[in-house]
Amino acid sequence: MFHMANDSNLFRSREQLEVDGWCLDVNIFRRKNKKYLPLIEGKMFMPFDHRYANVLFTDNIGRHGQPQLCPIANRLNPNSLPIPEYWVDSKWIDEYKVTVGTDYYAAFKAITSVTNERTVISTILPFHGIHDNAPIIILSEQTRKALVCLVANLNSFVFDYCARQKMGTIKLMHYVFYQLPVLAPSTYLQPVLWENTNHPLLNWVRLSILELIYTSWDIKPFAQDCGWSGPPFRWDEERRFMLRSELDAAFFHLYLTADKHGEWIRAEKSAGAVQDESSKELSELKRYFPTPRHAVEHVMNSFPIVKRKDENEHGCYRTKEVILEIYDAMAEAIRTGIPYQTKLNPPPADPSCCHPPKPEECI
């Protein structure tokens, strides 16, 4: 992670590199056997999308690097990658990459606000240089498999709601981030409540995250660590909406724990809560939210920009309605033991949703 002031002597612009004879290959500058890698900024990515925007140099003295949104046509091309404002010599990155032991990492936007459409924004990024306004997340080798679940957790509406209660500035400070209620890695080793099987939740989440994130070749090492050897998945707006809606419904069930009849369960330390919930506290909770489902509705109603965009485009708060529909279907599956059936056809991470393989991979 590079400090934009203290490390500025390491950065090179496109003009500087081209004058020095470097050639741009997609979004990496090459000359002989050397490389300059993109310097990724927070404004370049969105939830589950590391190809959200290019960065253009402008005449604005205060904010000269402005995002230029990548059109959907670019996302449909698995070879298309965003262009940054600056590049960094790969030698400053390779040493740290060897230490970490992966070719990718997770990151979240530090510059944000509770009044934005979404507050916590995270995705998986290729191991390039990164601006200090996008802190990276590196997990230990023992918990690295849960990185996909962590990114899903950070991008969920229920987690975003919690973060909005803690933030007081336009920056998600590290000390605030450390206090936010992230689910423990052990959560994802438990069976999927709404499938009535012994398959761990990790596998269920991983398939959806794989299709959401692996949309271009540059993130292939991440896909391989997820057990995927095929090509990237096609960008499909409707499928992405449904994938995210299923994940959000799932995380509402994980955070707002209920019994088989949809009633509140008293929080206990033995079940992972911070402290045992008293009868008085549970009664007070029920006074405002009689059931967990009422709490889901409240959380979704606290995102006015999402609501407004939905109403303008669909005539209703579609995101809330779909999440509640899936939430109810999962609750019914938990109650009856009849497995939940995904709304997606084909199901998440189905090979038929992929791009064709590269010609050299067909040989």
Image (cartoon, grey):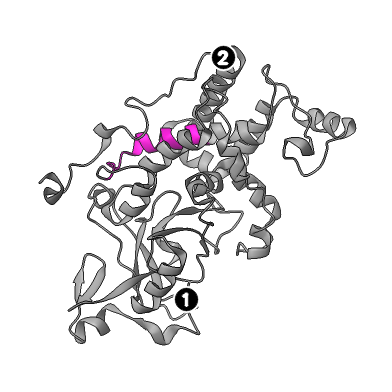
Q: Which comes before the other along the chain, label 1 or label 2?
A: 1
SS state under label 2: loop
Which residue is identified by label 2? 337
Q: Is residue 339 visible?
A: yes
Task: Tell me the amino acid under the disc marked 1.
Answer: Phe
Q: Is residue 89 visible?
A: no
Task: Tell me the amino acid under the disc marked 2.
Answer: Gly
Task: Tell me which corner region of the image, top left, top right, bottom left or bottom right, holds residue 228.
Answer: top left
Name the residue at 44% across, 59% down.
105
Name the residue at 34% across, 48% down.
224
Q: Indicate the position of residue 294 as horizontal and vertical percent values.
A: 68, 28
Would residue 136 appear left or right of 267 to someone viewing this image? left
Residue extent of the magenta highlight: 232-247
Q: Nearer the viewer, mark 1 or mark 2?
A: 2
Name the residue at 57% across, 43% down.
304
SS state under label 1: loop
Which residue is identified by label 1? 2
Circle 2 packing at 10 Å, graded few (<14), some (14-19), many (20+), is some
For residue 266, the mark is none
Circle 1 packing at 10 Å, graded few (<14), some (14-19), many (20+), is many
Q: Label 1 to label 2, Cα distance in Å?
A: 50 Å
Task: Tell me which corner region of the image, top left, top right, bottom left or bottom right, holds residue 273.
Answer: top right
Residue 142 forms part of the magenta stretch: no
Q: Main secondary structure of the magenta part?
A: helix
Q: Indicate the position of residue 70 as horizontal and vertical percent values.
A: 31, 56
Would residue 273 appear left or right of 321 to someone viewing this image? right
